[in-house]
Image (tube, grey):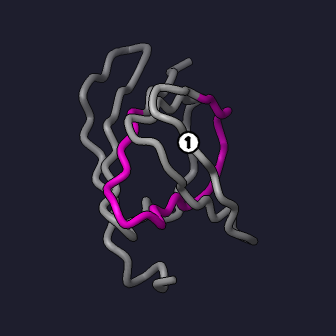
Amino acid sequence: MQDRDSRPLATGTKQIETDRVIVTEWRFPPGAHTGWHRHGHDYVVVPITTGRLDIFNGKETLPAHLTKGVSYNRPVGVEHDVINPNDFEFVFVEVELKP
């Protein structure tokens, strides 16, 4: 596994921002990661790709198996680095819910 500092960064493309939501498409080339971040809003993730992402929570790396079209949500305040361990691009859409 590559050191986090040598990995490429995932690319986020904001599609929509209103007073209620922010919609961003995230693309992870093989081996890419988001970098450590904290979520400022509750959010929903809609996978466009089926596969695994690794979630580093600051202490350990846990696998997350995602299925195309099967959404999940998390609360404000989540902190992590999301890593694509696959040999293919991984894509999801994130919908952040503003208060």
Residue name at image x 75 percent, y 71 percent = 59
Residue name at image x 43 percent, y 14 percent = 20
Rendering quarter of residue 57: bottom right
Q: Between residue 29 and residue 80, name the one nearer to us.
A: 29
Q: Is residue 59 above or below residue 40?
A: below
Count of marks overlaid on the render: 1
Check if residue 18 falls in the magenta segment: no
Range of residues picked out in magenta: 72-93
Q: Which residue type carries mark 1?
A: Leu
Image-based side of 24 in relation to 66, left or right:
left
* Residue 37 spot, x, y in % from top left: 53, 56
Check if residue 78 falls in the magenta segment: yes
Residue under label 1? 66
Residue density around tag 1, few if under 14, some if 14–19, many if 20 or more, within 10 Å? many
Rendering quarter of residue 13: top left
* Residue 47 spot, x, y in % from top left: 45, 35
SS state under label 1:
strand
Q: Is residue 10 above or below residue 8?
A: above
* Residue 5 spot, x, y in % from top left: 42, 82
